[in-house]
Image (cartoon, helix red, strand yellow):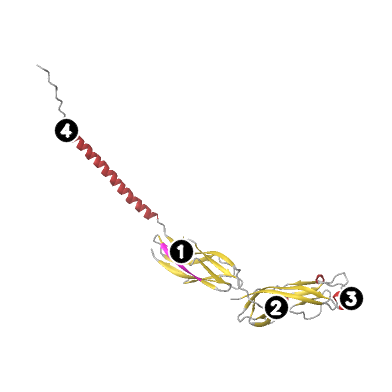
Amino acid sequence: MQPQAARLRTPFGRAGVAVKAMLLTLLVVLASVASLGASGGQSNGKAAAAKEAKGIIVALSPSNRSLDQGQSAAFDVTISSAGGFGGTVTLSAAGLPPGTTAAWSPSSGVLSSGSSTKVTLTVSTSPTTPAGKYDFTASATGGTIQSNAAKAQLHVKEVKRNFGVSGSLTGALAPGLSLPIDLQISNPENKAIAVTNLSVTISQVVRTPAAVAAGLPCSAADYSITQFTGTYPITAQPGSSSLSALGVPPGSWPRISMLDTLLLQDGCKGATLELTYSGTGQAN
């Protein structure tokens, strides 16, 4: 009797059940991971929303303005609520040049959650505002909330006007004597001029022919000048005016003095002083 090969029977039914169980377990694990992923994403979104802080956002338009000294320029200011902020905000500007004022219209704004409002910032310069480019900022405050500092630039251009300055002494100089000079200002423009930087200098000393013939010296070194000490600007209306007519006290007028020195000063007798006057005039 020949030996027969033994047949091994595998319990396919049980193996299939085991495989199915493994697959089912795998699907359950995958489902759990997917569920965790979805749950984690939702939590992150809530956390991000919770982190958004209340705030105020300010924007300036346009970003720059050019104007002449003495003129005004307007900027549009948009104020927006962020993170659910609501309440009254006050406005301020920083970095503007000297001689400049800032006016808000309206002077404050009211925001509700998610809203925006607009105000106008008017920057006014004066005739004495220094010419140049100035970076400034505008911001808003609501309670303890401070906005960003919105930036813009103001370009102030120098404006000069032609005018004349003259003057004369009211008497004769002598060693140790000082006399005031009542300056005369001539304004040919059809509007007022703001006058600053008045100055008087001795351009020449003209001796008499007798002093020249005798070789007697006299020069600007025999005199001294005290410049104008009053308040600037001096407003000169169209036409001619003087320091006295403008109400400037004589103590502020420029003065010229003849020095009393140990040197012989006979060469200054009868001499004529030629004076040069200068100043700066600005207007709109």
Of residues 4 and 275, the one nearer the viewer is 4
- Look at the numbered discs 2 and 4 and tell me whether their residues touch, using CB distance below 8 Å: no
Please give the residue where the numbered disc 3 appears in the rendered image: 213
Which amino acid type corresponds to the residue marked 3 in the rendered image?
Ala
Image-based side of 58 in relation to 2, left or right: right
Give the CA distance from mark 1 to mark 4: 73 Å
The label nearer to you, 3 versus 1, is 3
Residue positioned most to the top: 1
Q: Residue at x 28, y 46 (%)?
A: 34
Which amino acid type corresponds to the residue marked 4 in the rendered image?
Arg
Residue positioned most to the left: 1
Of residues 272 and 227, the one nearer the viewer is 272
Please give the residue where the numbered disc 1 appears in the rendered image: 58
Give the CA distance from mark 3 to mark 1: 79 Å
| Rendering coords of residue 198 (x, y %) | 69, 73
| Rendering coords of residue 5 (x, y %) | 14, 22
Please give the residue where the numbered disc 2 appears in the rendered image: 165
Q: Residue at x 30, y 46 (%)?
A: 36
